[in-house]
Amino acid sequence: YDPAMDEPTNEPYGVTVDSADRIWVANYKANRVVVYHRDGQQLAEFFGEFGNGNEQFSGISDLVVDRERRHVYVVDSFNGRIQEFSLHEAGDTISLQFLRVIGRYGSNLGEFSYPLNIALDQATGDIYVGDMGNQRIQRLTHDGKPIAAFAPDLARWQVFGLAFHNNYVYAADAYNNTIWRFNADGSNPQRLG
């Protein structure tokens, strides 16, 4: 973030809209999360400190808001982890409280190598993480316990976008120029184009 340029959305990588129609933006280079009202007015700004401690980041690439549990998950790409926060609201004031770090750099289940994207099953609270360096998607419980990892049966693929809708996980595969659809449990990969 360069204050002289007054650009809190420096290199936006991820965006999500919460149940109150607020727009949450993951700012990669600035390591910030900025929240906007649907009319474009900035409501809040969080983080901004580079590092590997709690509430420090090295490349915020995506985020998702769990409306049922009132949690926010922020992808900390170069640190190989997800940071989870509880969401608190009082009128127009939004605040986040650190809860936990999910994962660390590595290749075992529950570890990540350059996670890039995150999606959420709002019904169960399960999170899906596009684990780009390990060429897989990981499914975890809402409190970060690993459930499974899955990928299509290919030698190479690269998750560059992730969404969850109607019990399906959709993944944009930048390496093979296609979209994959999986069942919520990671089974039955289908190429959509």
Image (cartoon, helix red, strand yellow):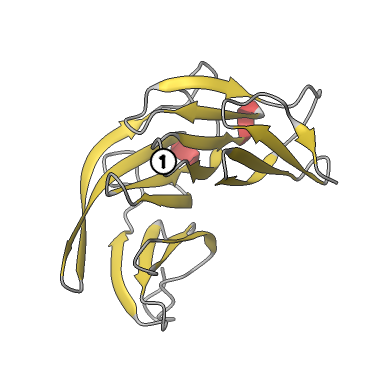
Q: Quadrant of residue 191?
A: top right
The residue at the far top in this view is: 108
The residue carrying pointer 1 sits among few (fewer than 14), some (14 to 19) or many (20 or more) residues within 10 Å by Cα, namely few
* Relative depth, front residue between 148 and 81: 148
Q: Percent position (x, y) of residue 165?
A: 57, 47
Between 20 and 25, the one lying in front of the other is: 20
Mark 1 belongs to which amino acid? Ala
Determine whether 179 is above or below 110 in the image.
below
In this picture, residue 58 sits left or right of residue 69: right
Q: Nearer the viewer, residue 94 or 2?
A: 94
x then y, percent, for residue 83: 34, 40
Seen in the picture, residue 138 relative to 40 is either above or below; the reply is: above
Q: Position of residue 122 (x, y in %)?
A: 42, 44
Residue to which mark 1 is pinned: 123
Q: Secondary structure at mark 1?
A: loop
Residue 52 placement (x, y as % from top left) = 34, 39
Going by the image, does 100 lie left or right of 181?
A: left
Q: Residue at x 81, y 43 (%)?
A: 192
Residue located 28% across and 69% down the image: 44
The single residue placed furthest to the left in the displayed view is: 90
Residue lying at 40% horizontally and 38% vertically, measured from the top left? 82
Q: Does 129 sit left or right of 183 as displayed?
A: left
Q: Quadrant of the N terminus?
A: bottom left
Above or below, 109 relative to 179: above
